[in-house]
Amino acid sequence: MEENVTLDEMLSFREKKVRMQETLQKDHDGATIVALGMNIPGPRKTSPGILLAFSAGGEELNRLFTEHGLTVMEETAVGEKAGYFKLYAVKSPDPHFVKKITIQMEETHPLGRLFDIDVYDEAGKGISREELGSPVRKCLICETDAKLCGRSRSHTVKELYGRVESIIDSWLIERGR
C-alpha cells in the first residue's frame, strides 16, 4: 500500500470523508463529530508505519473519550491508498471541550504532530484552534506556522516525509519495537 496517490484520488478521498461526516451528523442528531486523519506531506500517504501511527491515534482518542466520560455513539474508519481517516459521533454537550482534549493530544502525544484531528459541532461547523486561543500548528521541521511554511515551500517533500518517518521510528523505538 506504499504507492503514490494521484490528485484525483486525493480529491475523491476528501469527498468521501465529507459525505461520511454528513451521514454521521444526520444519523446522530446533536452529536459532536471528531475526524482523525494524518498530516502526511507528499504523494505517499500510506505505509506500515503510518498505519501503526494512525491506529495509535485511534486508540488514544478512544482512551480520552472514556477518561472524560464521553460516549462514542458510532465510529467508522477508512483506509485506502489516499490515506486513513476515522470518524466518531460523540455524545457531548460541549464540542469546544472535545476540541480542547484533541488539541492536548496533538500537542502531547509522541505522534501528536502527525495527527490531524478536526472537531465539528452539532451544526457541522468546524471548531478551530484559534477559536480556543490555542497556537497554530508548527511546521514538521522548523518552528514556523505550518500553513505559511507549506505555502512558501520552505522544505522539500523528501525532507518533510523524512521527518514523518523519523517521528514514527522514534515512537516505535520508544515502544520497544
Image: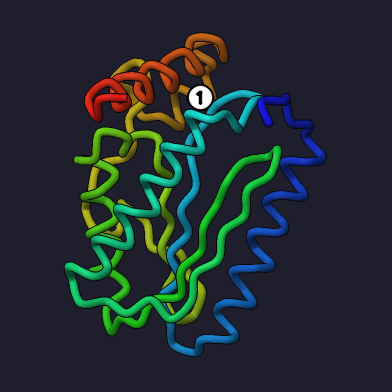
Residue 86: x and y, percent? 51, 57
Q: Quadrant of the C terminus?
A: top left
Identity, as a three-letter code, of the amino acid under mark 1: Gly
Q: Residue at x 44, y 19 (%)?
A: 165
The residue lying furthest to the front in this view is 177
Q: Where is residue 44, by image quadrant?
A: top right
Residue 39: x and y, percent? 48, 36
Task: Give the labeled residue for mark 1.
Answer: 150
Number of marks drawn? 1
Q: Front-most of 82 and 25? A: 82
Q: Front-most of 83 and 124? A: 83
Q: Front-most of 62 and 163? A: 62
Residue 10: x and y, percent? 72, 41
Q: Is residue 153 above or below residue 72?
A: above
Q: Secondary structure at mark 1?
A: helix
Q: Residue at x 68, y 31 (%)?
A: 1
Q: Is residue 58 above or below residue 147?
A: below
Q: Residue at x 79, y 31 (%)?
A: 6
Q: Is residue 140 above or below residue 39?
A: above
51 horizontally vs 5: left or right: left
